[in-house]
Amino acid sequence: KNEVEQSPQNLTAQEGEFITINCSYSVGISALHWLQQHPGGGIVSLFMLSSGKKKHGRLIATINIQEKHSSLHITASHPRDSAVYICAVQGNQFYFGTGTSLTVIP
Amino acid sequence: GAVVSQHPSWVICKSGTSVKIECRSLDFQATTMFWYRQFPKQSLMLMATSNEGSKATYEQGVEKDKFLINHASLTLSTLTVTSAHPEDSSFYICSARSGAGYGYTFGSGTRLTVV
């Protein structure tokens, strides 16, 4: 069993739609990260969370420590949001989800 | 914002040769850097934690004699893949913690192909 589970694995949305990506984890953590990986491979760190909610532009990340669950929301999605979104948790070591491949169609 | 520069972006090498990948923090000091590997269609896997001025800490299953890590300064860590084989072909990426609460900054990655 993976320590970090993401859903969905693949997601296609129309431009403008509200998108939610979920992440569940099974280990004790000090922080949870949401990462964005573009087709060329480069990775951008979107959020680091240890509690509550963070917002950056059209992106919102929430975490529920008791339920060991986090969500990444994208409002008013745009084709440039197309990427793989990876959830990673920081416990004794880093554990990574397998990623959610998002395609936003114009 | 914090920037981590990784070089080269891609490299092709012959079996048996060694390849060095550099990870440099451009506008901050990084006492700790991390090296990851990603196989096609798989998630990132932490290989090792690189500590400035001391030996790297390797994850289970990662050969320390094959993947040499040097972190000689507060802004530079290097990963050398020694005696490369085709199965070492992968995407290698580094990251550094860019200050308390600021999260982790990732390099742009290096695609290694061993032929």
Image (cartoon, coloured by chain):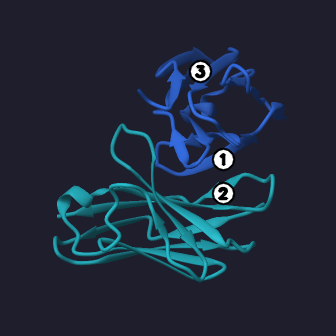
Chain colours: A blue, B cyan
Contact (Cβ within 8 Å) of mark 2 with mark 1: yes
The residue lying toward the viewer, choosing from B95 and A4, is: A4
Residue at numbered disc 2: B105
Instruction: Evaluate whether label 3 is on the same chain as label 2.
Output: no
Chain of the residue that carries numbered disc 1 in the rendered image = A
Residue appearing at x 69%, y 19% in the figure: A67
Residue at numbered disc 1: A45
Q: Give the x, y percent position of residue B11.
A: 33, 68
- For label 1, the SS is strand
Q: Residues within 10 Å of mark 3 (few under 14, many from 20)?
A: few
Mark 1 vs 3, N-terminal side: 1
Residue appearing at x 73%, y 22% in the figure: A66
Which quarter of the figure is the N terminus of chain B placed in? bottom right
- For label 2, the SS is strand
Residue at numbered disc 3: A106
Instruction: Evaluate whether label 2 is on the same chain as label 1.
Output: no
The amino acid marked with disc number 3 is Pro
Nearer to us: label 1 or label 3: 1
